[in-house]
């Protein structure tokens, strides 16, 4: 796993923790979580693409 995907995982965990602390901010925090998950998916796709190109 790359450092970038690990960073995304940490940010997702932070947002999930904040969601438990401030449930009234759920819509905003859920959007942030979706954004971090989307970023992680894009990073993973790029890593896979780069791996295919180097073979």
Image (cartoon, rainbow, N blue to C red):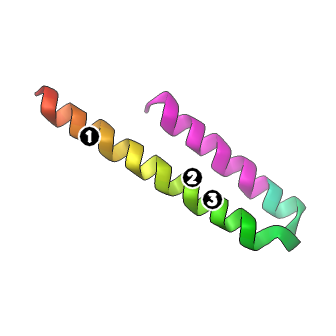
Q: Write down the residue under mark 1.
A: 48
Instruction: Please report whichever mark, 2 or 1, sits nearer to the chain's N-terminal start.
Output: 2
Instruction: Please report whichever mark, 3 or 1, sits nearer to the chain's N-terminal start.
Output: 3
Q: Is residue 51 above or below residue 22?
A: above
Q: Write down the residue under mark 3.
A: 33
* Residue 36, numbered circle: 2
Residue sitting farthest toward the left: 55
Q: Residue at x 47, y 47 (%)?
A: 40
Mark 1, secondary structure of its residue: helix
Q: Is residue 9 above or below residue 1?
A: below
Q: Are marks 3 and 2 in contact (CB under 8 Å)?
A: yes
List x then y, in percent, for residue 34. Answer: 57, 62
Cα distance between the residues tagged 2 and 1: 18 Å
Q: Are marks 2 and 1 in contact (CB under 8 Å)?
A: no
The image quadrant where one finds the C terminus is top left
| Residue range of the region highlighted in magenta in the rendering | 1-17
**Residue 8: which quarter of the image?**
top right
Mark 3, secondary structure of its residue: helix
Which SS does the magenta portion mostly show?
helix
Q: Residue at x 31, y 36 (%)?
A: 47
Looking at the image, how many numbered discs can be counted on the residues? 3
In this image, 49 relative to 35: left or right?
Answer: left
Mark 2, secondary structure of its residue: helix
Cα distance between the residues tagged 3 and 2: 5 Å
User: Badge 1: few (under 14), some or many (20 or more) residues near its Cα, within 10 Å?
Assistant: few
In this image, 39 relative to 30: left or right?
Answer: left
Q: Residue at x 83, y 69 (%)?
A: 25
Q: Is residue 31 above or below residue 16?
A: below
Q: Residue at x 89, y 60 (%)?
A: 21
């Amino acid at each position: 796993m790359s450092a970038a995907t690990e960073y995304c995982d940490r940010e997702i965990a932070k947002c999930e923790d904040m969601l438990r602390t401030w449930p009234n901010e759920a819509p905003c925090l859920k959007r942030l979580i979706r954004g971090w998950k989307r970023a992680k998916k894009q990073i993973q796709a790029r890593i896979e693409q780069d791996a295919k190109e180097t073979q």
